[in-house]
Amino acid sequence: MTPPVTLQISLAPSDHRLAAEILPHQIRTWRGQVAEILLTIDLHRSRGRFADGWAGGRDAILALANSIAGARVVAVDDGPEAMAAVSREFFGGRPIPRKDHRGGPYYSYFFALHAATHPRVLHCDADMMFGGGSPTWVAEACALLDENPDVLLTAPLPGPPAPDGRLRELPGRRLARPEFAYEFPDVSTRVFLLDRNRWRDRLGALRPGLAAPRGFILALLEGNPPRQLPERLLAAELERRHLRRIDFLGQAPGMWSLHPPYRGADFFAKLPALVRRVEAGDMPPEQLGFHDVCDQLVDWSEGRQRLAERRWWRRLREKK
């Protein structure tokens, strides 16, 4: 029996190039394990690095989303009635920032959860790839939630598993069971499965927090709301309320995630082959236990250079 879970994928016009390859991959990976596919598209233009490719990508991302058979495609509604409804569910009626201090998504995450048909939602960002291909991972994740009332979030193992099961960088604490499972002190909004009913019961009404001083300056530079990232807010709530996030591989062949840390010409040129390698589990030794696509798979020099050129102190100097 298919678990009553909504697969929700967040899209934006700036995602159109990578989503052309990754969205069909995500649908192939998860379609047989969920009861609903919900594609939410944030058409509210961002500022800063999240605005790249926005103007030319709107029609392309809408056409791509509407080409997915059986998917429900919903544009993020930031009108007053919709924002009020989302706020009542997650923020106790308090105003919700449209974007975080970087210009990244904020309100759209919560709108997407609110729009899901089912209380349990498997969310993933547009750039997330998945290997292993387990057809039972969602059912296993639901069982994990059922058996552990203090677990708020769960997700596939970050990165293909290393032979010894260790993670190269992430600060997870390995658990005795299930095998290849880690408890994390922080929250990632890249991919997670949660139960909205548990969320409301255990978290109550959230309060959007202000960004740290550097983020506050960045927000002022680019005209974004000076709000901390939603994952920072959620991580603080997990700690305060003694709740947990557990990422796990699951029964063989398991499920793991992979994230591209940058964008660049080499990434887009290699993306079709990269998706095929992820699906086949064809990963170099340097990738095992690592959550971001490694340099042995993609030349990230262009992406690193672009990021260095956008450092906040450089932009501050340019504004003078």
Image (tube, helix red, strand yellow):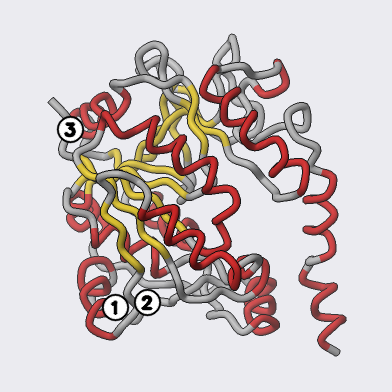
Characterize the local packing of mark 3: few (<14), some (14-19) or many (20 or more) Cα atoms within 10 angstroms.
some
Q: Is residue 106 above or below residue 134?
A: below
Q: Give the mark, 2 or 1, whose residue is nearer the N terminus.
A: 1
Marks 3, 2: nearer the viewer: 3
Q: Is residue 111 above or below residue 7?
A: below
Question: Residue 73 bears which disc, if any?
Answer: none
Q: On the picture, is 3 further left or further right than 101?
A: left
Q: Is residue 113 above or below residue 25?
A: below
Question: Residue 83 bears which disc, if any?
Answer: 1
Query: Residue 91 is drawn in which quadrant?
Result: bottom left
Q: Disc 2 marks which residue? A: 96
Of the 4 image quadrants, the one containing the C terminus is bottom right
Q: Residue at x 72, y 40 (%)?
A: 269
Residue 243 visible somewhere in the drawing: no
Q: Disc 3 marks which residue? A: 3
Residue 74 visible somewhere in the drawing: yes
Of the 4 image quadrants, the one containing the N terminus is top left
